[in-house]
Amino acid sequence: MADIETQFTEAMFDIYRLAKSEAKYNATIFLQMLTDEGGLRTAKTLINAAKPSDGYTALYLRHRLDLTVEAVVVKNSQWHQLFEPEELERARKRLREYGYMQTL
């Protein structure tokens, strides 16, 4: 079985594919980040950014925040061990600020 970081990277590629097929959003920059740096580094970069990425905004406008890195990380407790508590809270806060999952 693949290690947790490899599984996480696969999950990140999954949300790229879902965003493209279901939300009609081609996240080319996200795909490049995943390819170059892997899922964990990409997720940490996006979560720790001072403001939401263009991709996050595009998914928000499409009512698909469920396909953001923040939502995948927060909603799936199996990934929590990969992140600092502050990063998980930052992801929750961003989702709440955009009206997603008010109970986070």
Image (cartoon, rainbow, N blue to C red):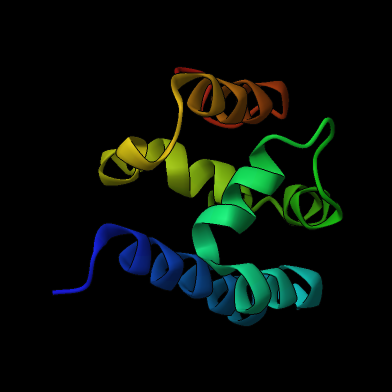
Looking at the picture, does residue 8 appear above or below residue 93? Answer: below
**Residue 4 placement (x, y as % from top left):** 27, 58
Looking at the picture, does residue 51 appear above or below residue 89? Answer: below
Q: How many numbered discs, if any?
A: 0
| Residue in the foreground of this view, choosing between 56 and 34 | 34
In the rendered image, the quadrant that contains the N terminus is bottom left
**66 left or right, relative to 31:** left
Q: Image point 33% across, 44% down: which residue?
A: 76
| Residue in the foreground of this view, choosing between 51 and 40 | 40
**Residue 99 placement (x, y as % from top left):** 66, 27
Residue 83 in which image quadrant: top left
Looking at the picture, does residue 79 appear above or below residue 12? Answer: above
Residue 70 in which image quadrant: top right
| Residue in the foreground of this view, choosing between 97 and 53 | 53
**Residue 16 placement (x, y as % from top left):** 59, 73
**Residue 58 placement (x, y as % from top left):** 81, 56
Q: Image point 60% across, 82% down: which residue?
A: 21
Residue 81 in which image quadrant: top left
**1 left or right, relative to 2:** left
Q: Image point 21% across, 73% down: which residue?
A: 2
Q: Going by the picture, which residue comes out furthest to the left?
A: 1
Q: Image point 61% across, 24% down: which residue?
A: 90
